[in-house]
Image (spheres, rainbow, N blue to C red):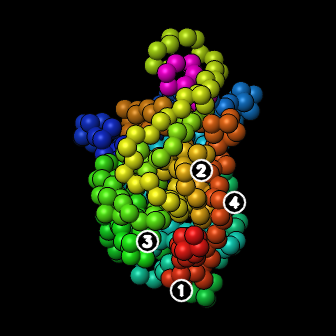
Amino acid sequence: MRKTLVGVLVGLVVAGTIGLHLAAQTTPTPATISLQERVLMASRIYRVISTYFPEISQEKFDGEYAEYLSRILRSEDRREFDLASMEFVANLHDGHSWFYDNWLEQNYGQPIGFIAYPLDGRWTVIRSRLAAVHVGDVITAVDGVPIPQYFERNRRYVSASSHRDAGLSFFDTPAIFPQQFKITLADGRAVAIDRKNDKKAEEPPAKTEGRWLTPSVVAYIKLPVFHGIETQAQAIDFLKQFHDAKTLILDIRGNPGLGDPKPLQQALMTQPYQSWTEASAMTGGVMLRNYSLGSTGHTEMTITEAVVRPREPVYTGRLILLTDRQCSCACEDFTMPFKTAKRAELVGETTAGTFSFTNFTAFDNGMLLNIASVRHKFPDGSRFEGVGIRPDVAVATTPEDLQAGRDPVLKKAMEMANAK
């Protein structure tokens, strides 16, 4: 979910937006949900989606809602209600549209301890906080079920903008996994996962890195996230240090966005560029939503003639961006102008393909609903959601590369930098 990665996004909104709701609770939340509350919640979810989601097929949506009602009316179990709601919202196939319940997170949301997704057709561990699971390990089965089948069986609960995006978010949706399960690895090992009791290594804080790869010629900056101003401020400080570099390699792989990328974008952009084209189910794009009281109905506002003109960039030399499928949301908002204006060369993977302004609703019972309200397209009007931003030079990373500590994407960027 993600895309953002919902685990990160929800962590932010839970800490801030619903803090007051949770503080007001003096008794444990029951594991059941009454018929009246189930029907009320379902009707609210239907209303919000119908009002705000920009690409709805009403007949299909109504049919899915009927199936959703049939499921939630059969049981008062709160987890069953949550899973049914997750599936209903995931049917929108949008990484920024998701359902979340703080009760489910507290009782079933303990982290798995690693992130894995398909590389070269194999489910590969990308990050791990568990001693027994290593980066580059290939997972072949979960509880004896071949992982392709296990994924297809459970992906219906994962909010994602594409099949690839669902794979990226799968292991980052812990509530759909058992508290205890076993993974089988390609090297023959079987690793027991105990989400509640496994000792997990601490994740280091997000910090921008910068160094010379070739002194005075090729510089490198790694930006982990756009949330807050600190990481971008650190990047801009590095830009000033590397001002005279002939080539700058900016690594935004693994960056989930989560912020406003404009400070760094402005520091690197040297030529005019066009903004996104926006479509909304309400009254149009940002300007119309802010200033119009028009009636509900699909409206599209084309803003490709709105040219943004850069001012006083910090770095004006050659720019290479390293991208991957984890680059989503604000990371893609950052990347798009560099691609369309040809200010930078993109190397690596196509980005996630999920970026949207959203309508966020926090309910008194600790449940949350986030629904995409504006559909972004490329300045030429072509589809972005579920497609992503393609690199100029595609470079794949294999499980063997991760196991050996090789970085073929950075290697290719260095070859390009040294070729001119």
Label 1 vs label 2: CA separation? 33 Å
Stretch in magenta: 278-288
Q: Secondary structure at mark 2?
A: loop
- The mark that comes first in sequence, 1 or 2, is 2
Tell me the mark number nearer the camera, choosing from 3 and 1: 3
Question: What residue lies at 63% left-to-right and 50% top-to-bottom?
Answer: 388
On the image, the x and y values in percent for residue 399 come to: 60, 78
Q: Quadrant of residue 355?
A: top right
Is 307 left, or right, of 166 in this rendering? left
What kind of residue is marked 4? Answer: Glu
User: Which label is found at residue 404?
Assistant: 1
Label 4 vs label 3: CA separation? 48 Å
On the image, numbered disc 3 is attached to which residue? 217
Label 1 Cα neighbours within 10 Å, binned few <14 / some 14-19 / many ≥20: few
Q: Secondary structure at mark 1?
A: helix
Label 3 vs label 1: CA separation? 27 Å
What kind of residue is marked 3? Answer: Val
Q: Secondary structure at mark 3?
A: loop
On the image, the x and y values in percent for residue 314 come to: 37, 51
Residues at circles 1 and 2 in contact by the CB criterion of under 8 Å:
no
On the image, numbered disc 2 is attached to which residue? 342
User: Which label is found at residue 152?
Assistant: 4
Is 127 left, or right, of 139 in this rendering? left
Question: What residue lies at 38% left-to-right and 63% top-to-bottom?
Answer: 244
Is 153 left, or right, of 197 in this rendering? right
Label 2 Cα neighbours within 10 Å, binned few <14 / some 14-19 / many ≥20: some
Q: Quadrant of residue 403?
A: bottom right
What kind of residue is marked 1? Answer: Ala
What kind of residue is marked 2? Answer: Lys
